[in-house]
Image (cartoon, rainbow, N blue to C red):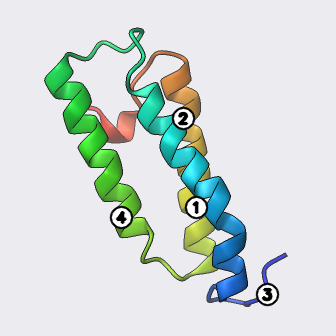
Amino acid sequence: MAKGLIWATAEDLARNRGHVISLYRQILRSLNSPNLPLNLAARLAKKAEVRAIFMLASEERSLHNINDLINTAEYALSILRKGEIPNSIQW
């Protein structure tokens, strides 16, 4: 359970760190799937987009926003595993 009520404490951030890094790596690996209808340039662009999203999200300190970001990453990963591109990052 979260220690902070609204803002994340150092313990909260440390607790989520492993899960977030795992999601990040899984999403990057999923973008390499041959099932996705992307050429090399599009794959590299998507990976850059994922990196930017995770870099911006790393600054987040609100517990609710952190949970929303983790849920969004899990949803995007499930869509990528189906061989589809999530709507939020489609061109």
Query: What residue sits 43% from the left and 67% below the top?
Result: 57
Q: Which residue is mark 1?
A: 68
| In this view, the mark in front (1 or 4) | 4
- For the residues labelled 2 and 1, the Cα–Cα distance comes to 14 Å
Tag 2–tag 3 contact (CB < 8 Å) = no
- Mark carried by residue 58: none
* Helix, strand or loop under label 2: helix
Residue 36, image x, y percentages = 37, 15
Q: Which residue is mark 4?
A: 55
Q: Amino acid at mark 3?
A: Lys
Q: Residues within 10 Å of mark 2 (few under 14, many from 20)?
A: many
* Earlier sequence position, callout 2 versus callout 1: 1
Residue 42, image x, y percentages = 19, 26
Q: Residues within 10 Å of mark 1 (few under 14, many from 20)?
A: few
Tag 3–tag 1 contact (CB < 8 Å) = no
* Earlier sequence position, callout 3 versus callout 1: 3
Residue 34, image x, y percentages = 38, 9
Quadrant of the rendered image containing residue 32: top left
Query: What residue sits 50% from the left and 42% below the top?
Result: 25
Considering only vertical position in the picture, is 72 above or below 78? Answer: below
Q: Which residue is mark 2?
A: 77
* Earlier sequence position, callout 2 versus callout 3: 3
Considering only vertical position in the picture, is 26 above or below 14? Answer: above
Q: Which residue is mark 3?
A: 3
